[in-house]
Amino acid sequence: MEINGIAALLAVAIVAGTPLLYAAMGEVMAERSGILNLGVEGMMLVGAVSGFMVTIITGNHWIGILAAAGGGAVMAAIHAFITITLKGNQVVSGLALTIFGTGTSGFLGKNYVGMPAVDRFTPIDIPYLCDIPVLGTILFKHDAMVYLSILTAIVLWYILYRTSWGLSIRAVGENPAAADAVGISVSRVRYMATIIGGIMAGLGGAYLSLAYAPTWQESITAGRGWIAVALVIFALWNPLLAVAGSYLFGGVEALTFRIQTAGIHVSPFFLSMLPYLFTILVLVIVTIRRRQEAGVPAALGFPYDREER
Amino acid sequence: MRLRLVRRNNDSWLIKVAVPIASILLAILVGWIFLALSGYEAAETYRRMFYGAFGSAYNISETIVKAIPLALAGLAVSVAFRMKLWNIGAEGQLYMGAFAAGGVVMMLGDWPSILLLPLMMVAGFIAGALWGFIPGVLRALWNVNETITSLLLNYVAIAWVGFWVFGPWKDPNAMGFPLAPRFPEAAYLPVIPGSRVHIGILVAILVAIVLYIVLKYTRWGYEVRVTGESQEAARYAGMDVAKNIILVMLISGGIAGITGMIEVSGITHRLQQDISAGYGYTGIIVAWLARLNPFAILLVAFLFGALLVGGFGVQTYGIPYAIVLMLQGAVLFFLLAGEIMMKNRVIISRED
């Protein structure tokens, strides 16, 4: 493959990785506060459908994106209420969120299936930078949501590691009793982090329906929410590493397109398995190499009960 | 305003029954609101759903037809859930079981029923078990998260079946539809005449009885329950936790595999792309609602069979089938919230 072909492939990898990146960054925030949310797939779907519907109704994809963020936030709030306030089982609540989100999005979007997006994200060439040979094609000819996702990763990283609020999130995820003792409201911090996770998942979903596809169909996410959950482990709960991870996974997806268009005779069914198999493989390697529980927020998955201290 | 939970000590059976029932009613209410807000006639929708599921002898038999795979899938995942292993890969294990059963028919289709059906069932069990073995062994040896791996393998299994029915096993007489050839009648499960209710119902009941006995009265069942409560305690007591994780995932996957065999042999009579109406996922809710009790699973599966049949029924009335998934998710939310109410008293206080 010549150099321009590789550049085009990498550009597609970034686009394919962007919905994963949003969702994974959001899940990083939630898990850092100690809340495991397996409902990413459901939150993405609700984001995708609400973003798409509102864009069709208002004719403006930016209003659509706001709606997607709102939809994801509402979904995450359900999970937060059950797992934080009521201290319910996080795994089951997350599964319920995925099932509920799949149903709700299918129900709401029924009359929108297959419609083209009236307004959508289109690539913006960054002046001068896009003219750089090769690198320009890979990095500087994307839509606004791609640039925004990278910016968000940097901001989230900064919040987590350089602000007192980020310190609270990490403290609550590591040792909620100690955080509580120094006056941090464990519930409040966990609510915020979980809802940020929902907003991000909603944006990731809307990226599919407003830029990547761009249309609505039932279960448009096709398991990307679960890949995002795996990515969080791969990224060691760090938003910046999530960028690299997402593009790697996006690269696998881009490669399957590339193989198909190159006329190499592999069954499309086997190609469609690749992202899932690759995710499992990476998950295994990362888990084995990590050996100890390094990087996992110590209180992940456990409700906090002040009286049980 | 602030919610506070105070642990209560009584755990009466009334609450155990009342909470699931209240959860279902509240989910119906949520569905009602969604339907009304979307401009549908909620009362009429539910009336039609109810009629579709219970309105005639035939409708009830169809509800049972759906309840069979739901019960088996629910039993499958309940085994793993007992050990707090989150096997959410029953859907894929079901597809692999169906694939293996179909493969047996492709190779040995001229064999008599009495040999063919047991062989299909064994093949289904083994294929499902192998598909459960993968997340099981990864979890047992290296602590790889089984929730994610088992879920991701669903997509792989569905694509795998797709490969065969769109490719090597595609029926040339199916006019281009992605279907494997129709089974010979020797590969059909016997049915109750005049209905589609097949002998799979006995398989489901049998599996429930066996699981109940094994989990309650054998040493291994005891080990599974202890490990589910605390892996530390199990290790301390000298139990082989890794071995039990793998065994439980094999059995869980195997039962899901049998579910797939039963669907192709009892209902579709051929391998095809859409074997399951999400039975593997709904089975999770069935198991949880039944609090993992095998006999309660049979009962709850009947209710959810009704939901599925009713949901199919109202599609002609313009209601998207997705309402079924919405209701399922809502039931699970209320159940989770209700369980907390069951264990605690909720006190609402004004001060922060």
Image: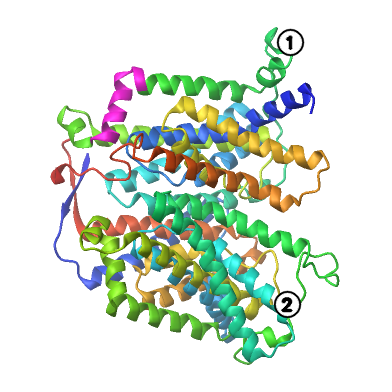
Mark 2 lies on a secondary structure that is helix
Q: Which mark is residue B257?
A: none
Instruction: Examine the rendered structure and indicate whether residue A223 appears above or below residue A31.
Output: below
Left or right: residue A261 versus residue B298 is: right
Badge 1 is on which residue?
A: A131
Q: In the image, residue B218 lies at what x, y percent? A: 29, 78
Magenta-highlighted residues: A161-175
Left or right: residue B194 versus residue B3 is: right
Between the C-alphas of marks 2 and 1, the distance is 60 Å
Q: Mark 2 — on which chain does it sit?
A: B
Q: Is residue A170 magenta?
A: yes
Q: In the image, residue B341 lies at what x, y percent? A: 24, 57
Left or right: residue A131 versus residue A170 is: right
Q: Is residue B107 magenta?
A: no
Give the class, few, some or many, for how many residues have Cα within 10 Å of label 1's Cα (few <14, many ≥20).
some
User: Can see residue B44?
Assistant: no
Q: Amino acid at mark 2?
A: Met
